[in-house]
Image (cartoon, helix red, strand yellow):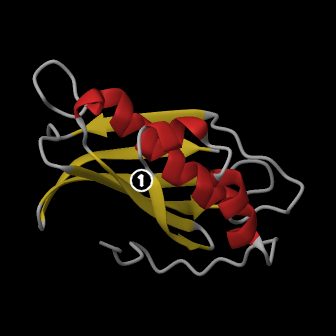
Amino acid sequence: MTGKFPAPFAYQSKNPDFKALIADKITRQHFMKHIGFEITCIEAGYVEGSAPLVSFLRQQDGRVHGGVTATVADLVTGFAAFSLVSPDDRVVTSDLKVSYFSPGTGDMIFGRGWVIKPGKRLHYCEAEIYDYHGEESVLIAKAFAIM
């Protein structure tokens, strides 16, 4: 499922152990665990992951709930930003704008997020969220986040 890095960015993390620190933080991400989201790729400035679209992640018409889509966007952009900061720094979401393109009706949601411009205090990020039904994928949302 691993996608290709969406842009020719080559970032250097301020933390040489960012992958281990993110793996540790994931153990305390209780909501992420609750929805079954697993990060599958961590690179400096780039993160991706997926979750099975079980029934409690769907709204009344059987489509993926918009809040789940936004959560996936927040997770991948937040960890992408976190991958670039110093070990003692923290990352929180300042802004998150999600544009929904298509309803998710498949069996899995996949998200990838990346930093488009790192800054001293703010990192500007983007995400793409896909719905998978078997091998078929549909782009269901794009997001812009400031972390």
Is residue 60 found left or right of 40 in the rendered image? left
Q: Residue at x 43, y 35 (%)?
A: 97
Q: Locate the N terminus and report the quarter of the image it occupies.
A: bottom left
Front in this rendered view, residue 97 or 72: 72
Instruction: Judge the density around disc 1: few (<14), some (14-19), many (≥20) Cα neighbours within 10 Å.
Output: many
Residue in the picture at 51% in, 64% down: 47
Whether residue 98 is visible, yes or no, is: no
Name the amino acid, label 1.
Ala
Q: Residue at x 68, y 61 (%)?
A: 22
Outermost residue toward the top in this view: 60
Residue receiving disc 1: 127
- x and y, in percent, of residue 38 in the image: 46, 56
Figure quadrant of residue 24:
bottom right
User: In the drawing, does residue 52 fall left or right of residue 48?
Assistant: left
Question: Does residue 98 lie above or below 123 as drawn?
Answer: above
* Residue 131 position in % (x across, y down): 20, 51
Mark 1, secondary structure of its residue: strand
Of residues 9 and 102, the one drawn nearer to the viewer in this rendering: 102
